[in-house]
Each structure stands twice: as structure tokens, then as C-alpha cells.
Amino acid sequence: MATRRQRKSKQKLAKQKQEENKKRNTAQSDNFNQELDFNDISELDGIKAYVLLKLSKVINSLKSGEEDGIKIIETANELKRLAEEPEKSYNEYIESNKDKISKKNLSRIKCILKNSKYSLNTTERALLETQMRAISMEYAMKNLDYETIDYGAIRVCFELSYEAIFEGLEEKKINSLDIYVGYGDTLSGFKATYEDTAEKYDLSKHIFLMPKWHSLDELYNEYTVYKHKYVNFKESSLNSLATAYATQKEYETRTSGRELLSYNGIALNYFSVLEVELKKLIVQNFNVEHNKLKLFDAINYLSKSEFVGLSAEGVIKQLHEIRELRNKVAHGYTISEYECQNIYRTLISGQILQFISWNLANKNNDDPIYQLKQGYKFANGIGVEKNYNTALQWFKKAAEQGNTEAQNWIGAMYEKELGVEKNYKEALKWYRKAADQGDANGQYNIGYMYMEGLGVEKNYEEAVKWYLKAGNQGDAEAQSWLGYLYREGLGVERNYEEAVKWYKKAAEQGNDISQNWLGYLYKEGLGVKRNYKEALKWYKKSANQQNVSSQNGLGEIYLEGLGVERNYEEAVKWYGKAAEQGNDISQNCLGYLYKEGLGVKRNYKEALKWYRKAADQENDNSQACLGQMYLEGLGVERNYKEALKWYRKAAEKGNDGAENCLGYMYAQGLGVEKNYEEALKWFRKSAAQGNIASLQSIETLNIIMNNKYNQYSIKTLRY
């Protein structure tokens, strides 16, 4: 039977253990008060990370063309459940994978779930729920007819959810959410407008986004747009286009069941415009009678023409496909929404009707837009053989009528010697004509000419002046160069804050060079407070555009553990990407990682390969490392002469380590006749740069020389 003293001792031990557990749990909880890097996450990093990974996976599959409707619906439904019941859904995932998760990670997950910043707030849940509901509705409206699904719109819904959750929305009601979509249905940004209140709201009743389409009563506005765009079309054609467009948008707002009306009526309006206006163009330019001309023949006449935008084989093929759809409707068959959308994309988005309008106006080739397009066609060899001389003639016709794009083209042709003799002064003249009209491209081009001293004396102040004009109009290239000029203090006083400001403007437009420099400035704390996480973010954006400097920067961040846990595998990955693109610094670092076996299995031959690639680009560190490899026989047979050769190459560039090693080889007589004076010379060069080993070697060598070259003392030298 336990004594009272034993019971007290047990109670004391139990209490101590309880206190230790409490401290450990508190420490774990404190660990997760740090910011989580959502660029580098796993499914075990909480609800927000789990949702982002789900979204990222489906976005990548859509980008690669994997349009699996069943998987998309399943993913959308799962994300919808996560928005409605995040904790319950996430816990179900953890429970189902419990056997694969370590006890340490399970404990970590419990801590994460207590921290609200790793979950979704009410606003983010509402956005996710409505976007996933929109995706489900797209499939329901099309009655699961996967061929007619608008996968571009679906991708935008997924991308909007990802970007909003990644950036983080404020936990308050959103009045409006503007989304910006670029070419290829790519989300280029969004802007949320909040109510000025922090009051919570009902998730199930909140509506974020109401797309506004043109309704039929706005037909007059559409007619006005088309009248402005297709100035050479008949009134009846303009009415047909406006009706077709407005009716199509009206159909697209239907929210339940199958369409009540077919798309034949819309398509017929487009068919009639194409037939009327194309025949008019052919009659105007070829000796044919209108009443005997069939649509089939009118399309084939285009192959015999030089009409801008219409004579290419691909365009003719597309028009015949539309003609076949017209025949389908004429024989009483119903076309699908997808086929109707294809007609719209070909004729309107593909600008075929606009090209018909331009060609109708330009029987005498006097329209500057037509002239510009002709110049572009010959400059790029589109549908014709590339011919810069002909292109220049067309560009000059448009430029003389004040077309700024043509003026910039002419400037570029003189600057880059395209079909004309290089003439910077002539290039500057045409750039200035465009710039004087407020054209941002012209202003940028003048800034560049002054910065590089092309046709004018180099003048950084003038470069800044013109770059500011273009940069304030949103020109990303000009903004990037302004960042450079402020960073280097060229034409302006050095100002890192201004450099950051301009780099950020360009970086937000996707300029990879600016993203790289922004990452560097955050890493070094120049113009901003040092912030490794921001540096990582901008380096990754730039590196994903194959920017070699950013890939090298990421290698350094992971190698040194700057703002992230040191990760040699990631360092190898990013140094490898940059090294493959020929970056000598990354090649040198990759050689080092292979030599030391960091992040990869130690491999001297692979190290030697990368050191040699960098050394061939005159990288002195790699040349010194090659010297070491040959000196010690690492991955190659020991060869003192080769070692001496590479050490000398690096030493002659001022590499203090190579200077020290070269001194060592002369002192020891390795690969060269022993020569203490020569050894002393290189030791002194190295010591002057603060190399401690050389300082010690000088002292040792002086003793040896004063003792008439005592052979025992020479062994104390080190490289």
C-alpha cells in the first residue's frame, strides 16, 4: 500500500507533467502565430491552405487543356461544402487520412485550426460559395452537355476564388466585385468595394456578383456602337448585328433549364451581314455581277485578293465552316449555343467583319488603319512574303496621316535596320512625331534613345523626363527603367524609395525584370523595410516567367534560409533552372551543392561539369573551384598543371582564394618549379584583400626564407 509520501510524490510528478504539456501546447500554438507562406503549403497547413491547393490543382489542369467535366463538378461541390461548413469538411478529410498523418502533425493541425488566419473568414467563404455555385449552374444550364461548356468562364471562377483567398478579403460586406479578364479568359485582377461596416452577414443570403449584360431595350446603344465600328456597312447590316448581339447576351442571362428559343435566329442575323457585305466587297473589286455571285464563290475570291486580314488560308477555311452552318439552318436544323458562339468569335472577335469594313473603305487605300494593317502584314509575313520595303511604304502612308502606331513602326525599322540602313536620327524623328501626340510608346522610345545615346548624346535627365511621361500613362517598360534609373542614381539623385515605387507599378503589370528587382530590394532592405517573405513572393512571380536572375535569387534564399526554412532541395531546383539557362553564378552554386552533397547525392563529376560551364564564362569562383578539384583529384585524376592553370585564371581576376592557392603551389612546387618569391607575391596579393590563410603563409614563408629554405617548415603552409 502506497505511503502518504509516495502519493504526494506521484501527485507532484503528475502536476509537473501537466505543466510541461501545457507549456508545450502553448509553444506549439505560438509557433503558428507566425505568418504562413501560402506560396509553399501542404494540405496539412489548415483550411485555407487546403482550399488554395484544391483550387490551384483544378486551375492548372484547365490551363493544360484537361477539361474533365465530372472532376470539375466534383471539385466545385467539394469546395462549396468547404465554404459552407469549413471545419466539418476539413476534419472529415483529416479523419479519412488519419493513418497517413504522424501524431506530431495531428497535434500541429489542432493548433492551426485554433488560429483564424489559417481558415476562411465569412467574406472569403461567401465568395468561394457563390463562385462554385456559378460553376455548378453552368453545367446545369447546359444539361451536362460537356462540349458546350464555357471552360474559360469556369477557369475565371476558380482563379478569382484563388486570388481573392490568397490575397485575403476583409471580413465585411462587399458591395461590388469588379473582375478584369484578359486574352484567353485569363484573370488579370479584381477589385473589391466594401461597405463601411464590420457587421457580419448571413452567408447563405449574401450575393457578390451580378453580371450585367446588354438587354434588348438597349438595342439602340448597340446599333450606335456597330455604326461607329463598321462605317461602310448598310443600315440593315448594322441593325442585324446589334439585334444579334443583344439577343445573344439576353439568352446568356437565362438561369434555369434548357433554352426556350433556338440560336438559329441569332445566327441568321450574322449570316445575312456576312453575305451582304462580303458580296459587296467582291463586286467592288472583281469584275463579277452581284446577282450571279454565290457566297461559296465570294469566299473563294478572297484567296485571289490582297485584302488585309482576309486572304489567309485559315480565314477562308473559317468562312466556309460558317457557310456550312448557314446551310444547316437553311435546311431546318437547329444549331447549338457552341456553334453560335463560334460564329460570333470568328466574325466579331476575329475581326473578319471589321476587315471587310476596312477593305470596303479602301478601294483607293487611303484609310490609315488599313494602311497600318497592310504594313504590319508585310513586316511580319502574314499571308504574304515578308517584305520590309513594302511594309515601310504602307507605314509611311499611315504615319503621314498622324497614325502613332505607324510612326513607331517606322522609328523601329530605322533603329533596328529592318529593310533600311540603320539611322538613329531618322528613328528619333519618327518616335518624336508619335510622342508629341501623347503616345506612350513614342515617349518610351525617345527615353530609351537618350538613355543609350542613340542618335543623340547620352542624357539620363532627358531619359527620365520621357520615361516619366510614358510611365505615368501606365507603360510597364518605362516604369521598369525608371526603377533602374532611381536605383542607380542616373539622371536623378539615387532614391531607393522611388525605385521601389516604379518597380512595383511595372511588377504589378507582370514585368518580370521589375519583379526580380523588387524581390532584390526587399531582400536587401533598400527603399523598404527588409522583408524576406515579400522578396520570395516577387522572386517567385518573376522566376515563373523564366527570369534567370530571380531563379538564382530563389536558390540563394533557400540555400541561406532567408525568411524560410533552409531547404537544399529547393536551392538545387532553382539554381538548376537558372544554370540550364546559362547563368554562371547559379552554375557555380550548383557545382558547390553537388560537390558537398547538399540537396543531392554527392557527385564530383556533376560538380565538375557545372564548375566548368561557369568557368568557361569567366566566373572566377568556379575557376578557383576547378583548381581545387584538379589539385585534390575530386572527380578527375589529380593534375597539378590543370590546377595551376585554373587557379591562375581566377587569381588574375583578383580572386583572393585563388591567389592564396597559387602562392601555395609555387611554394610547394606543384605543377611548377618551386619559387618562393613568386609564392610570396601571390600570398601578398591575397593578404591585401584580407585573406587570413595568406597572412599566415607570408609569416611562415618569411621564416623559411630566413632559415635558408628549411624543408621541414614548408610543410606548415596551408591552402
Image (cartoon, rainbow, N blue to C red):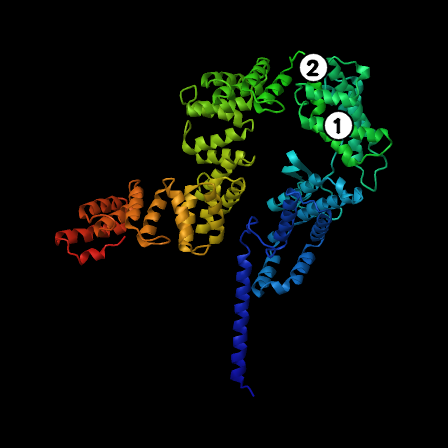
Q: Residue 361 carries which label?
A: 2
Name the outermost residue toward the bottom. Answer: 1
Residue density around tag 2, few if under 14, some if 14–19, many if 20 or more, within 10 Å: some
Residue 422 x %, y %? 46, 19
**Residue 697 vertical position relative to residue 415 in the rendered view, above or below:** below
Visible residue check, residue 656? no
Residue at image position (54%, 77%) is: 11
Looking at the rendered structure, the kind of residue marked 2 is Ala
Q: Is residue 150 found left or right of 381 in the rendered image?
A: right
Are circles 2 and 1 on residues that touch, CB within 8 Å?
no
User: What secondary structure is found at the residue carrying circle 2?
Assistant: helix
Residue 367 x %, y %? 65, 15
Task: Please name which of the two marks, 2 or 1, marks the residue nearer to the observer.
Answer: 1
Residue at image position (45%, 32%) is: 484
Q: Relative to the observer, which residue lies in front, 386 or 574? A: 386
Considering only order in the chain, which callout, 1 or 2, is on the residue closer to the N terminus? 1
Q: Which mark is residue 107?
A: none
Q: Is residue 162 found left or right of 642 in the rendered image?
A: right
What residue sits right under mark 1 in the picture? 320
Looking at the rendered structure, the kind of residue marked 1 is His
Visible residue check, residue 76? yes
Marks 2 and 1, how far apart at CA = 24 Å
